[in-house]
Every structure is written in structure tokens, then in C-alpha cells.
Image: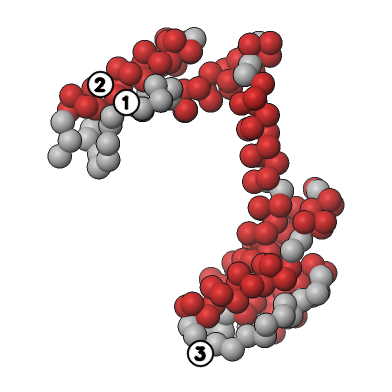
Amino acid sequence: MHDTDDLNAARAHALEEGRRLGLPPEWLEHLPRVGELPGSYAVPKHGMDAFLTWKRQEMLARQGRFDELDHALVAEALEDAAIADGPKWLHDTVERVMFALVWPRRTYAMHVEMLMAADHLENCLQDSPSMRLFADLPGCWRSVRHDVQRLDDAIELPEACPWPTLDALRVAVDERTATYNGIT
């Protein structure tokens, strides 16, 4: 059990930090009043609360107070968004499709997962055709191959990626869908 004083101190610190950052008092009053949870409630060592700092940037942007924004923080957020919504998202989606294609057990859920990932992939490429430039199929394949063999080392998979292009990957999904007796 953690001392309730630590929890109260953490909330008081968050309120103080929020006021210092200029967050509206009515917003600060809506910060949760949680009971004890596992973990530490100590005040951050660096003295800055990252969540409140980002909320302040959001508030300033929504109020049109762009001259007050921390430009380095905003640039960092945009960079993170571009990576998360771009190459990382593409990589993760391609891996989901590949895994669903090679996993030997055919279940309804695996079929749905494959179709959803393929649709997400298609939408991503429609919205951002430049994402094709970031499609590292051999890298995704190495990761999927490792994941599959970690789960079942008896499964034999080729060293090289069986799909040389994103279009070939989509054709494999279509072929698998055509042979599945569940849903289409």
C-alpha cells in the first residue's frame, strides 16, 4: 500500500504545475481524484509534468496563441505523429498481414485480422502514396518469421520474403480470402 499523502502530494503538485503552465482552473479541477493504485506517486525528479506540458501546448494551439507555443515541443510532436502515422504504422500493418498469412492455424479471428490489416494497408497507401517508399518487406518478413518461429519452432518458413511487393502481398490476401470457407 502506498501512503495517501503521496497521492495527495502528487495531485497537489499537478495542480500547482498546471497553474504555473497557465492551464484554466476549471480544466485543472477535472483532473482525476484516484484512489490508491500500484506504482509510485512521487513528484517527478525534473520538476516538470510532461502530460500537463503537452496539455498546455494543446490549449495554446486551440486558442490560436501560436506565438506562445514551445516550437521545439510542437516540432517533436509533429515528428512523432509523422512517424507513427507513416512508416511505423505501415511497418506494423504489413507485419500483421504477413503474420496472418503464414500462421498455420486458420481461425475466423485470424481471417478477420488479416482482412482488417489489409484494408488498413490499402487505405494508408491511398491516403499517402509516398508510404510505398517506406515499405521494407524484407525487414517486416524477418520480424514476422522470428515471431512465428518463437511461437512454434516447428514451423518452417523461407528465409526470403515470399512477397516481393505490396501488390503481391495484397494478391496473397485475396487468394487466401477466396479459399477460406468462413467469411469473405
Residue 130, which numbered label?
none
Q: Taking the image as drawn, is residue 173 in sight?
A: yes
Q: Which residue is mark 3?
A: 154
Question: Where does residue 33 sit, x and y in percent of width and height?
Answer: 29, 26
Callout 1 crowding tier (Cα within 10 Å): few <14, some 14–19, many ≥20? some
Residue 9, which numbered label?
2
Question: Where does residue 124 sit, x and y in percent of width and height?
Answer: 75, 53
Question: In the rendered image, which quarter contains the C terminus?
Answer: bottom right
Identity, as a three-letter code, of the amino acid under mark 3: Ala
The nearer-to-camera label among 1 and 3 is 1
Q: Residue at x 22, y 35 (%)?
A: 36
Question: Where does residue 79 sit, x and y in percent of width and height?
Answer: 68, 37
The nearer-to-camera label among 1 and 2 is 1
Residue 43, which numbered label?
1
Q: Earlier in the sequence, mark 1 or mark 3?
A: 1
Q: Residue at x 41, y 25 (%)?
A: 46
Circle 2 sits in a helix, a strand or a loop, which is it?
helix
Circle 1 sits in a helix, a strand or a loop, which is it?
loop
Mark 1 and mark 2 residues within 8 Å of each other at the beta carbon: yes
Q: Quadrant of the rendered structure where residue 98 is?
A: bottom right
Circle 3 sits in a helix, a strand or a loop, which is it?
loop
Callout 2 crowding tier (Cα within 10 Å): few <14, some 14–19, many ≥20? some
Q: Could you tell me how many numbered marks the image carries?
A: 3
Question: Where does residue 152 sit, x and y in percent of width and height?
Answer: 48, 83
Q: CA distance from mark 3 to mark 2?
A: 54 Å
Q: Residue at x 66, y 39 (%)?
A: 81
Q: Earlier in the sequence, mark 1 or mark 2?
A: 2
Mark 1 and mark 3 residues within 8 Å of each other at the beta carbon: no
Q: Residue at x 81, y 70 (%)?
A: 165
